[in-house]
């Protein structure tokens, strides 16, 4: 059964922006006859009690899901299996140890790279977005790694060119399909698969889980739009390494909610959670808040079945919703 999902990080109470995206995820799944799953992305920055609060608030606005939520913290074996499959398919160095700090990467990124154009007639080097990993630790010898391990624990990165079957150092390109944004294309660098504090990296966990849960519709905030091409690429490479088909995934990156200053909505922007709103003004019942969020999406008010019937992803607003400070 195809499925959609909402995947909150239990870092705090859900605010109006999170709830609005969750409602879109639920509507998109229901309107397309999909199951709907909830996945708790608790690999880092967890605030104790936040998961239970988030589930309560999601139920309070009328969402329900088709199976017990899964937690990423309980799924290490799956992530480990994906790394093992990549190494089995492409050699042990397909996933390599990286000892760079953020600062090292920022400095290396601003220095000329091997392969960069050095004369005016040469074709321009591919654009490297900020934070793009230049491959510093790719190809370290075992002796060099042993020395660096004494100074700093290693992160694990995928050798994207090797896994893509391209010449060393080349940068694969990938695309994702988004119902609002169309085809999105991006470069794939040597992504981190496990961080140097031992936590599995978001990009790995998200694609492994979506595949394992049969998710073929990914709805989330459009701050993650840039991640979609490399996630599709990684999902396809892992599927290939594991000898299973890579299901097509449709994305829907929902424009964010901004505060009156045009910045991404945050808890400090006043009454932005269900509890705060109810405390501020008893008129803000759960149903009234939900209806306000539906109206911001151009959808009819309760019952939710009416919004399901009217839901058309292509007709969603393409601009962020500016929350003026009160509903
Ligand atoms: N856990 C992420 C968040 O709360 C969402 C990741 C995703 O949906 O892929 O922003």
Image (spheres, grey):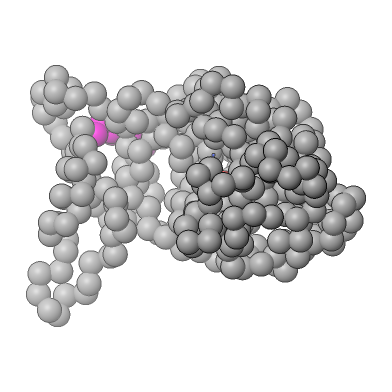
Q: From the viewer's perspective, is residue 99 above or below residue 30?
A: above
Visible residue check, residue 273: yes
**Percent x, y for residue 271?**
61, 45
Q: From the viewer's perspective, is residue 109 above or below residue 262?
A: above
**Percent x, y for residue 137?**
19, 38
**Residue at x-position 40% and y-position 26%:** 199
Q: Nearer the viewer, residue 93 or 23?
A: 23
> Can you tell which quarter of the image residue 102 is in?
top left
In what quadrant of the picture does the C terminus appear? Answer: bottom right
Visible residue check, residue 255: no
Q: How many marks?
A: 0
**Percent x, y for residue 245?**
60, 43
Question: Is 95 contained in the magenta span?
Answer: yes
**Residue at x-position 59% and y-position 27%:** 50
**Residue at x-position 59% and y-position 22%:** 49
Does 314 sit left or right of 143 as displayed? right
**Quarter of image, ligand 1:** top right
**Residue at x-position 35% and y-position 38%:** 192
Find the magenta span and give its range. 90-98
**Percent x, y for residue 288?**
80, 49
> Can you tell which quarter of the image residue 1 is in?
top right
Q: Nearer the viewer, residue 258 or 208?
A: 258
Q: Nearer the viewer, residue 200 or 245?
A: 200
Question: Is 193 contained in the magenta span?
Answer: no
């Amino acid at each position: 059964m195809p499925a959609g999902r909402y995947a909150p990080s239990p870092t705090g109470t859900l605010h109006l922006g999170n709830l609005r995206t969750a409602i879109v995820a639920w509507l998109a799944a229901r309107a397309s006859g999909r199951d709907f799953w909830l996945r708790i992305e608790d690999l880092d920055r967890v605030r104790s009690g936040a998961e239970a609060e988030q589930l309560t608030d999601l139920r309070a606005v009328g969402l329900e899901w088709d199976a017990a939520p899964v937690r990423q913290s309980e799924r290490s074996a799956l992530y480990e299996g994906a790394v093992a499959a990549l190494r089995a398919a492409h050699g042990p160095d397909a996933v390599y140890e990286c000892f760079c700090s953020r600062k090292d990467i920022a400095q290396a990124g601003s220095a000329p790279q091997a392969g960069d154009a050095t004369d005016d007639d040469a074709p321009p080097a591919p654009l490297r977005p900020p934070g793009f990993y230049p491959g510093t630790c790719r190809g370290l010898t075992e002796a060099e790694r042993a020395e660096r391990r004494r100074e700093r624990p290693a992160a694990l990165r995928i050798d994207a060119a090797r896994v893509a079957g391209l010449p060393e150092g080349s940068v694969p390109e990938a695309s994702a399909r988004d119902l609002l944004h169309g085809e999105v294309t991006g470069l794939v660098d040597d992504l981190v698969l496990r961080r140097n504090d031992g936590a599995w990296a978001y990009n790995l966990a998200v694609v492994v889980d979506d595949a394992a849960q049969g998710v073929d519709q990914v709805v989330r905030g459009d701050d993650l739009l840039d991640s979609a091409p490399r996630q599709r690429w990684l999902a396809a490479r892992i599927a290939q390494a594991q000898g299973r088909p890579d299901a097509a995934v449709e994305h829907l990156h929902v424009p964010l909610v901004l505060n009156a200053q045009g910045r991404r909505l945050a808890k400090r922007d006043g009454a932005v959670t269900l509890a705060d709103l109810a405390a501020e003004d008893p008129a803000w019942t759960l149903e009234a808040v939900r209806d306000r969020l539906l109206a911001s999406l151009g959808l009819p008010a309760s019952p939710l079945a009416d919004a399901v019937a009217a839901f058309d992803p292509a007709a969603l607003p393409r601009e962020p919703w500016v929350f003026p400070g009160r509903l």
